[in-house]
Amino acid sequence: MSVKKTTTSSRPPLSPRLRLSAHAKIVLRGRYLAKNTAGTIVETPPQLFWRVATDIAQAERRYPIAGRLPHAAQRWYDCMARLDFLHNSPTLMNAGRRLQQLSACFVLPVKDSLTSIYDSLKHQALIHQLGGGTGFSFRHVRPHNDRVASSSGVASGPISFMRLFNLSTDVIKQGGTWRGANMGILRIDHPDILDFIALKQTPTEMTNFNLSVGITDSFMQALARRRT
C-alpha cells in the first residue's frame, strides 16, 4: 500500500526547544545530520528531528480520517525534542530521505550453498551501507573437510565463510556513516562448534561479530541427566 505525503512545513517548530549536550551535538554532526555531495552539513538538529517526525507521521495516512492522530508530526517532534524517545540510528539517518531504510536489525538466511552464502554477503553489505546490523545462523553450512559431492572436493566450513562476512564489514564501515555489526550463531550440535567457541581467543578474529552458541532442548536434557 502506498503512502502519500501530506503538506507539512519544512521548517521545524520553534518549541519545544532542543536542549542537547555538547557531546550530543558532536555525534549528530559526525553521523546523523544530512550532508550534501561535498560533505557539507546542510541541516540543523531541529531540522533533523522535524525531518524524522514528519516522515514517521505519514503512517497516519493508513488510518481512516476519524481515527488518525491529530497533529501527529508536531506531537512526535515534541516527544523527540524532550528526549522522551529517540529512534534508532537508521531512522535518524534515513527517514525522509532517498534511502528510507528505517530498520536496525536484519536476520539473513545462510544455506549450505555458495549461491545462498554470497547472496547473504551481498545483502549484508547493502544493509551495513544504510546503517543496519545483520544476524546469521551458520548451522546449515556443512563442517570443515566434509565431502562436496557436486565438485568432488571438501568443504571449508562455516568459520571460513564467517571470515568473509567479517572482512566485508570492515570494508563497508571505512566509507559508511555507521560501523556495521553482526551476530553469528552456530548450534551446539554442529561438528565445528569447538572451533567456533575458540574463535575469540584470537583478538584479531571476528572483530565485527558477536558470537552465540545455539542451545538445543536435547543438549539441555542431556546436561540435566549428567547432573543427576
Image: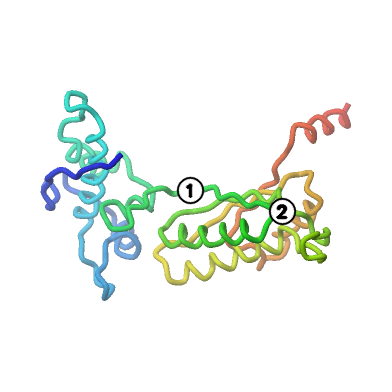
Q: Is residue 17 left or right of residue 94?
A: left
Q: Quadrant of the N terminus?
A: top left
Question: Which residue type carries mark 1?
Answer: Cys
- Indicate the quadrant where residue 225 lies: top right
Element type at marker 2?
Answer: loop
Residue sitting at the far bottom: 38
Dot 2: within a 10 Å radius of its alpha carbon, few (fewer than 14), some, or many (20 or more) residues?
many
Is 174 positioned to the left or the right of 191 in the image?
left
Name the secondary structure under disc 1.
Answer: strand
At a point 27% along the width and 38% down the height, the residue shown is 59
- How far across and how far down the image is residue 179, in percent? 47, 62
Give the residue displayed 59% in from the left and 51% down from the top.
Answer: 183
Q: Which residue reaches farthest front?
A: 150
Among the 4 quarters of the image, the one containing residue 61: top left
Going from N to C along the chain, the mark reached first, 1 or 2, is 1
Q: Where is mark 2, residue-wise? A: 141
Quarter residue 53 falls in:
top left
Mark seen at residue 52: none
Query: Furthest residue to the top?
Result: 66
Viewer-nearest residue: 106 or 214: 106
Q: Amino acid at mark 2?
A: Val
| Within-10-Å neighbours for mark 1: few <14, some 14–19, many 20+ | some
Q: Is residue 94 positioned above or below 36 on the image? A: above
- Residue 94, x across and y down, in percent: 32, 55
The mark lying in front, picked from 1 and 2, is 2
Picture mark count: 2
Q: CA distance from mark 1 to mark 2?
A: 22 Å
Residue assigned mark 1: 105
Residue found at x 55% / y 67% = 168
